[in-house]
Image (cartoon, helix red, strand yellow):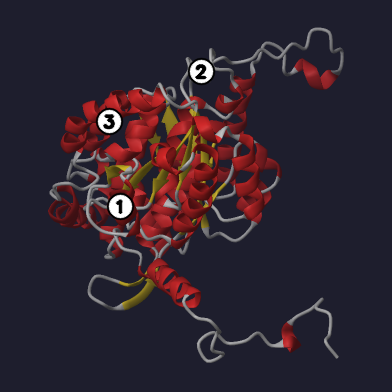
Amino acid sequence: MSIVLDYGDILTPRLGSNGIEPERLKTDLAEKFERAHAKIEKTVICNEGGFIDLESTWTDLEEVEALAQGYKERFNAVVVVGMGGSSLGVQAVCQALLGDSWNLMDDESRDCFPKVYFLDNLDPVGVFELLEAIDVRRTLFNVVSKSGSTAETLALYAVIEDLVVNEVGPDKACEHFLFTTDPSLGTLRSIAENRGIKTLEVPPKVGGRFSVLSPPSLFLAALVGLDVRRIIKGAKIAKEQCKSTILRDNKAGIIGTLLYVADLEQKRNVHVIMPYCDRLQKFCQWLQQLWSESLGKAQNLSGDLVNNGPTLLTARGAADQHSQLQLFTEGPENKVIFFLTLKDHAGDINIPVEKLEFDPFRSLSQWRLGELLNLEYQATVESLRRMGRPTMTLELDKLNEEVLGELLMLFMVATVYAAALYEVDPLNQPGVELSKRLTFELLDREEIDPSYLPKTDSRWRLGETSSD
């Protein structure tokens, strides 16, 4: 298999009394998972058009690939403008499969595929620097918002549209934009229809954070030369593997169930995802949003107040062995560390120590950097185990389109299984919607009513110059 789940270090035979009894995977936890599976099968797996519906995606790939080819011939850069799930998934795909040096390569090294940039925040310095660095006349702007009305995305579009009009003129400006949005609703849809801007439709039943394998997201992957069919092939593999109702045979079920038990039974409500592969850092940020927004809910499906949801943090192996490992090893016993490792580090580098006649270098003789990185991972797992700190590991054979597609689908399914165990809706985000609504209400007010937004009290502010 291209992905292997090792969960021995969260069970009692290896971890001791801090672990979970493996027999429970055949008894009460197996029964819990079977009930969760039945719920998901009705609400998600059989939800035609949802993220699990790969057959619909497959039929749209030819159109996506043709559109990407047309834009490739016209533009040498693409800027994805979007927030949260509209951006994080495609960032994860691009970093994992293109690496961090893609935009530094010349056209020949990139096979003339475009450079790719992301605008996913409102920091004016970052926005200015990116827009200054690109040639607007050779750039496509993919503006992404499922609702079509995200305040940050609309603000960035207004800034960019003004720049593009000034550079190429109002008649040609629309050719530099592609909107990814709802098929019929929202401000972006209205602008597109009014100005003749091309659009990609976000499937109505696919939420932003679950949209990474949808046709609009795969468009960007195709535009930069990735094999989107192999991505979907990997996702199909994970989907089939995660269908089993038997907990011990279901990787997504094991991940969701064991992390759920660690949280609610053992009070290990901090889940740390720690890849020993730099190209998976954006993937971890995508997973952070997926896990957090899907599981962190005030109410359960019955309407009871529960305020449940684990906190997912990211770390980086091996760098964070020198910053966070001390906390993981000896700090509060409220964490599960989830490792991602890679067997095949493409282009591994030898460590030449022959001419360095110092004792510390002798132990590095005949090792390569990737091999040393994997040794560091093994030492970290063992140090945590000896301190009674639970861990789990996903071992990837290599990192290519098929493996990444499998990895993305695996964690989306694990998330909805966990949501069924927590008895919450993984597809909504009422806490986020409140913030969005308040933002628009504040934008529409000429003055802020103190009763609406309480004024800060000067007694509790330090460093501010007194007006007296």
Q: Earlier in the sequence, mark 3 or mark 2?
A: 3
Q: Residues within 10 Å of mark 3 (few under 14, many from 20)?
A: many
Q: Residue at x 45, y 49 (%)?
A: 82
Residue pointed to by mark 2: 110
Q: Is residue 250 left or right of residue 167?
A: left
Q: Is residue 2 visible?
A: no
Check the image and report above or below for 35 versus 54.
Answer: below
Q: Residues within 10 Å of mark 2 (few under 14, many from 20)?
A: some
Answer with the quarter of the image where residue 332 lies: bottom right
* Quarter of the image where the C terminus is located: bottom right
Check the image and report above or below for 100 versus 155.
Answer: above
Mark 1 and mark 2: Cα distance apart in space: 36 Å
Q: Is residue 258 visible?
A: yes
| Picture coordinates of residue 298, whole percent (x, y) | 37, 73
Residue pointed to by mark 1: 194
Q: Residue at x 84, y 19 (%)?
A: 359
Residue pointed to by mark 3: 64
* Quarter of the image where the N terminus is located: top left
Check the image and name the residue furthest to the top.
354
Q: Earlier in the sequence, mark 1 or mark 2?
A: 2
Mark 3 and mark 2: Cα distance apart in space: 20 Å
Q: Amino acid at mark 2?
A: Arg
Which of 219/377 is in front?
A: 219
The secondary element bearing badge 1 is classed as helix
